[in-house]
């Protein structure tokens, strides 16, 4: 029996008994989608955020910078991408982290591996993917996301593009970051910190989740399958690059876009195509590019976008091949 069966029963009861709408209608299908996904995703988000928030008490920014400093081999990219999964820093932290990491001795390629992984493979993405698609798809997404961060950062490191970092980065002193590792913290203190982090994350993203699920419910119940299949179905060989190119200039919180991906997959779109779109939206968002432009020259920013776009397209095709 599925651990989420109670949510399915509750959603069916709300739709049929409270609203009096048959489940086999467009409206009934949309309402069931909404009332089933909202409590399921919220529960998973709170649980996973609590676990990750507790782990984050051992992973503070200054510790991350110190661990990654001086690692100039492929191992540095692997470590940076792995650490990015468990740290709470998003694209809004790009500039201070970029400055702090480079001034702290973290190579450019290793820094990019971290900055690719942190916003794309985080606790919110994991919670939503697990709730919407199950463990297998979640594990595959995390594996592909981390691999993309490792490869993307490695390519940028091999190209040695430090000359395209804005000169002022090398001239300023990195601000010190308070070490909050708390080696003497008790487990109860770490759990309390994790719960606080979980509540903060929940309070920040729940409107995006509800909005995304509402839009996904509308797609699920009302958008004709043949309409979607014509432009992004499995018979369209260019569906993956088209989806990525559409996603690059957009911006949506991962909490808002993943429920939409569920609805698109339910309409018959290949999972790789949809997740490539999701990766493009979350890892190449317009606000992040604007922020990074403050510290990167246009040439390096263009290389970063090109490497990431090519990698995400490759992931989409590979995901589609493995999931068929």
Image: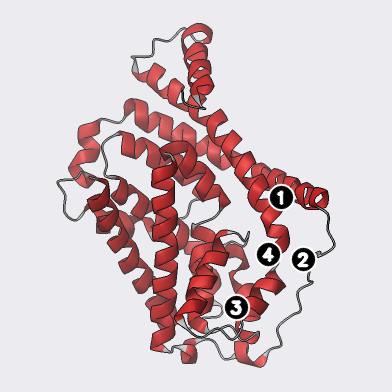
Q: Which residue is mark 2?
A: 181
Q: Are marks 2 and 4 in contact (CB under 8 Å)?
A: no
- Residue at position x 57%, y 91% in the image: 167
Q: Are marks 4 and 1 in contact (CB under 8 Å)?
A: no
Depth-wise, is mark 4 or mark 1 nearer the camera? 4
**Could you tell me residue 304's position as x and y percent?**
41, 75
Q: Are marks 1 and 2 in contact (CB under 8 Å)?
A: no
Cα–Cα gap, marks 4 and 1:
13 Å
Q: Which residue is mark 4?
A: 59
Mark 4 vs 1, N-terminal side: 4
Dot 2: within a 10 Å radius of its alpha carbon, few (fewer than 14), some, or many (20 or more) residues?
some
Mark 1 vs 2, N-terminal side: 2
Mark 3 vs 4, N-terminal side: 4
**Could you tell me residue 16's position as x and y percent?**
46, 9
Q: Secondary structure at mark 2?
A: loop
- Residue at position x 54%, y 31% in the image: 40
- Residue at position x 52%, y 27% in the image: 3
State left or right for residue 58 relative to residue 213.
Answer: right
User: Compared to 181, does 18 lie above or below?
Assistant: above
Cα–Cα gap, marks 3 and 4:
12 Å
User: Compared to 237, does 157 lie above or below?
Assistant: below
Q: Which residue is mark 1?
A: 197
Q: Secondary structure at mark 3?
A: helix
Q: Are marks 3 and 1 in contact (CB under 8 Å)?
A: no
Cα–Cα gap, marks 2 and 4:
7 Å
* Residue 68's disc number: 3
State left or right for residue 173 relative to residue 152.
Answer: right
Cα–Cα gap, marks 3 and 2:
16 Å
- The quadrant where residue 241 appears: bottom left
């Amino acid at each position: 029996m599925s651990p989420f069966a109670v949510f399915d029963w509750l959603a069916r009861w709300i739709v049929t008994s409270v609203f009096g709408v048959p489940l086999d209608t467009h409206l009934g299908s949309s309402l069931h989608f909404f009332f089933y996904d909202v409590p399921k995703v919220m529960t998973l988000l709170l649980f996973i955020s609590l676990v990750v928030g507790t782990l984050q008490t051992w992973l503070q920014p200054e510790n991350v910078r110190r661990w990654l400093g001086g690692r100039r081999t492929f191992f540095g990219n692997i470590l940076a991408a792995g650490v990015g999964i468990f740290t709470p820093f998003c694209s809004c932290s790009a500039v201070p982290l970029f400055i702090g990491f480079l001034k702290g001795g973290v190579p450019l390629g290793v820094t990019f591996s971290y900055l690719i992984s942190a916003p794309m493979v985080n606790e919110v993405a994991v919670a939503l993917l697990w709730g919407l698609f199950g463990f297998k798809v979640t594990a595959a997404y995390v594996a592909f996301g981390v691999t993309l961060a490792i490869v993307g950062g490695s390519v940028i490191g091999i190209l040695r593009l430090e000359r395209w970092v804005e000169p002022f980065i090398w001239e300023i002193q990195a601000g010190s970051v308070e070490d909050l590792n708390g080696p003497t913290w008790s487990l109860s203190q770490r759990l309390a910190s994790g719960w606080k982090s979980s509540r903060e994350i929940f309070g920040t993203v729940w409107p995006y989740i509800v909005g995304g699920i509402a839009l996904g419910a509308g797609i699920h119940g009302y958008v004709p399958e043949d309409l979607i299949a014509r432009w992004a179905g499995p018979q369209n060989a260019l569906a993956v690059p088209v989806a990525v190119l559409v996603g690059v200039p957009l911006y949506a919180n991962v909490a808002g876009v993943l429920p939409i991906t569920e609805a698109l997959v339910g309409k018959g779109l290949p999972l790789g195509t949809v997740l490539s779109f999701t990766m493009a939206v979350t890892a190449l968002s317009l606000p992040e590019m604007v922020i990074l432009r403050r510290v990167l020259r246009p040439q390096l920013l263009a290389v970063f976008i090109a490497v990431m776009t090519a990698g995400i397209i490759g992931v989409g095709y590979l995901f589609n091949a493995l999931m068929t």
